[in-house]
Image (cartoon, coloured by chain):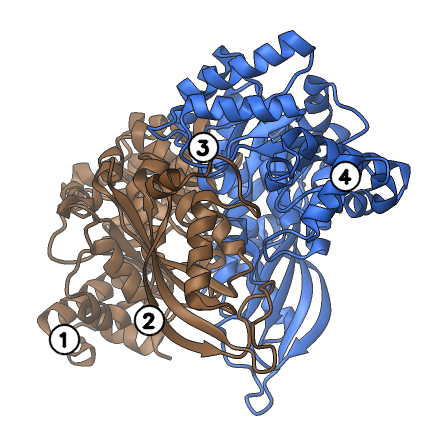
Chain colours: A blue, B brown
Amino acid sequence: MPNERVEAMYWIETPSGVADAAEAMADEQSSGTFVDVPGETNELRERHGATVERIEERGSTEQPSLPGSISPSNAQSPTYTQAEVVISYPLANIGASLPNLLTTVGGNLFELQELSGIRLVDVDVPDSLAREYPGPQFGIDRTREILDVWERPIIGTIIKPNVGLSPEETADRVETVVEAGVDFVKDDELLANPPYSPVEDRIVEVMSVVDAHRDRTGTEVMYACNITGDVDEMLELSDCITDAGGNCVMVSVNSVGLAGVRKLRRECDLPIHGHRNGWGGLSRCPQLGFDYGVFQKLYRLAGVDHLHVNGLRNKFAESNESVVASAQACQTPIVDEDDTAMPVFSSRQWAGQAHDTYEALGNTDLMYLAGGGILGHPDGPAAGVAHIRQGWDAALRGVPLEEYAQTCEELATAIEYYER
Amino acid sequence: MPNERVEAMYWIETPSGVADAAEAMADEQSSGTFVDVPGETNELRERHGATVERIEERGSTEQPSLPGSISPSNAQSPTYTQAEVVISYPLANIGASLPNLLTTVGGNLFELQELSGIRLVDVDVPDSLAREYPGPQFGIDRTREILDVWERPIIGTIIKPNVGLSPEETADRVETVVEAGVDFVKDDELLANPPYSPVEDRIVEVMSVVDAHRDRTGTEVMYACNITGDVDEMLELSDCITDAGGNCVMVSVNSVGLAGVRKLRRECDLPIHGHRNGWGGLSRCPQLGFDYGVFQKLYRLAGVDHLHVNGLRNKFAESNESVVASAQACQTPIVDEDDTAMPVFSSRQWAGQAHDTYEALGNTDLMYLAGGGILGHPDGPAAGVAHIRQGWDAALRGVPLEEYAQTCEELATAIEYYER
């Protein structure tokens, strides 16, 4: 640790000179106050100061993207300069601590009045930090091992209706999709541990379906049971799931936070399925907040095994390019090959996005979740699952979807139905 | 709980009709998928559906504030309508769970393409939830009791330089400000538990200063020791602080998250000083994210006793109006009088803001922290503390600052120095 540094890359916009703005950022995150203070020696600054490593200008604008910045030096023709800036911080300031890393690379920076735009684009992770946070326990490979699914995506669904079902009704729905052939089934993020469907009861009901299916067919199905909650509750519920023979827990990571996810990772021996709801609040203004690359790195280090990335042609505000970049980020090692997480594609998915998804990633190391794409298939859920398998078969073989559909009835019906 | 509902108020902007957009929000957060699903009965919708309670239009704009929304119906002269919308959710959907409350009232909503702007403005808290989350242990009154400071703000400072000091050097700095007369002293958010200043050592050194001062003068000083970290680390360090006779812990709430703060509140019998760093990332784009009123409510319910609100005429991007509203929010009961938190004013504070702060709040139930405002005073820290006390005396007596300074040397010097 003595000489290790954390490098963070930012997109910034500033009414000041870019170099001044970058220095203000480095000062704020190492020793900032508004007057000189006794004891802030050059030697201390040398040892603990943040350093501006690189600046690349990226154009300019005449209007500030965010409110609250200082007036530009030339008020007659105001210019807000945009730039990519890399700042490094001594890891010794932080220690091997993920929450304190976040405070240092983000923290007060978002409020600086020297900036009219600031987005955290990337953070690299020194070895000492990675050793303290070994990352996913299961990730891509061990998730595949549990399911014995290889060389194709893990195909899954979300239990629908997503709220309001009793544990028994939930198990009925699970039975339907398990018989239909899914590899994976999860709770909606809106269903965690409410009085009308306590996890304690739901897990027993659902696992009896999963167990019966395994006994009958030899095939494992993974059920991500949503245990989002306070720390004590999550630990209690994860024990309860382990006792019931469950094989996955789901957590809404932004609602729980870094420390809570990390604690669950330490105590729970099941894969952690990370739902990203709330992510839009951290990212949808392009001139503020976080790139997904940073977000996924923080929560992977905290321990999630799967992480939602939205899907191509989704029902939300995100572009396809952004979805692909997110999935690639999850599949990129931080320190070693074992620390990747499985990207989870979801939202308006059916076979129609298989080719583009495969082409963009060049691999099948992903979960492909369809709600309406499976349950809404005109010929029922089994046809729903079948048509997605067919779509991915076609993608893997390089056969166009329409052509492949000529010999696959489920796919042909789906094309007609979902493209209507 | 059976009939309790959570009401959330949003500011939204939409290219659709406002009523349609609000319905899309209610659907998404109760039973949203892109095709009808068997089993989603009217009876289930009735029992578990979210309801649009109120819509008030608030003008319109020709440009979308956020990217990714659908095209407006009238593409020739596009209009994005802005509105205040209230949506209610059955608490039975959520249970008495703060993380799941956040997923429900926020969650995927930030990504809806029916919206080109969405900000969560307020959330009310049903009784069942408040009973599960009793809020601050100490809040305003018990913090005052510990310090025996009444009818004026608690005056404090941040240890500077904020990074790089050894535990012994930190204690030396604390000795200086304690002798200067502060009520409260805290670590910077950039100093938590790094190898060069482990909390275990720092708390012993600092408390020996605080204890000696108490023995000598009978006066208590509160030291907020920053224990931000993973759950196990925070609990270990809070024990360590309790054992050393410490009287406050500090946490960067956004870096730790709701579940981590809640767990600390359960296990730790000391006041929790909540630092808000990272807040700008959740709030600085006015058309996205969270109002402070929601943020402070969530973390107060999780258990923080003090919460940073920035300060008037601060060095950051926030307006004075926003700072005042934040402080008022902290001082407003959620369920009962005991659940308020003490707002913490900080950033470029000296006596110069005392009158305006007092006038805006009408009370002194706050912490008033000065770094440079105390340590940078030309006549030293004792004069720094004295001038702030004098400034607040003047405010409380309704005497203008300049007039009061005629009989207060420290204040007169400060006015000359800080207004230069």
Q: Earlier in the sequence, mark 1 or mark 2?
A: 2
Question: Can you name the residue that lies furthest to the right here?
Answer: A398
Say which quadrant the C terminus of chain B sits in. bottom left
The three-letter amino acid code for the residue at tag 2 is Asn
Q: Residue tagged by mark 4?
A: A411
Mark nearer the viewer, 3 or 2: 3
Q: CA distance from mark 1 to mark 3?
A: 59 Å
Residue designated by label 1: B407
Instruction: Give the residue at mark 2.
Output: B320
Look at discs 4 and 1 and give the one toward the viewer. 4
In the depicted structure, whether residue B403 falls above or below residue B177: below
The circle drawn on residue A228 is: 3
Q: Are marks 4 and 2 in contact (CB under 8 Å)?
A: no
Label 1 packing within 10 angstroms: few (<14), some (14-19), many (20+):
few
Instruction: Identify residue type, mark 4.
Output: Leu
The nearer-to-camera label among 1 and 3 is 3
Give me the residue at 52% from left, 66% from top: B116
Question: Callout 1: helix, strand or loop?
Answer: loop
A10 lies above or below B104: below
Compared across the picture, whether B213 is left or right of A294 comes to: left
Mark 3 secondary-structure assignment: loop
Q: Is residue A77 left or right of residue B411?
A: right
- Report if residue A7 is visible in the image: no
Q: Residues within 10 Å of mark 2 (few under 14, many from 20)?
A: some
- CB-based contact (under 8 Å), mark 3 and mark 4: no
Q: CA distance from mark 1 to mark 2?
A: 29 Å
- Counting from the top left corner in percent of width and height, residue A12 is at 62, 65
Q: Nearer the viewer, residue B205 or A309?
A: A309
Q: Which chain does tag 3 point to?
A: A
Could you tell me residue A327's position as x and y percent?
Answer: 71, 43
Residues flagged by tags 3 and 4 on a common chain = yes
* Residue lying at 59% horizontally and 28% vertically, measured from the top left: A185
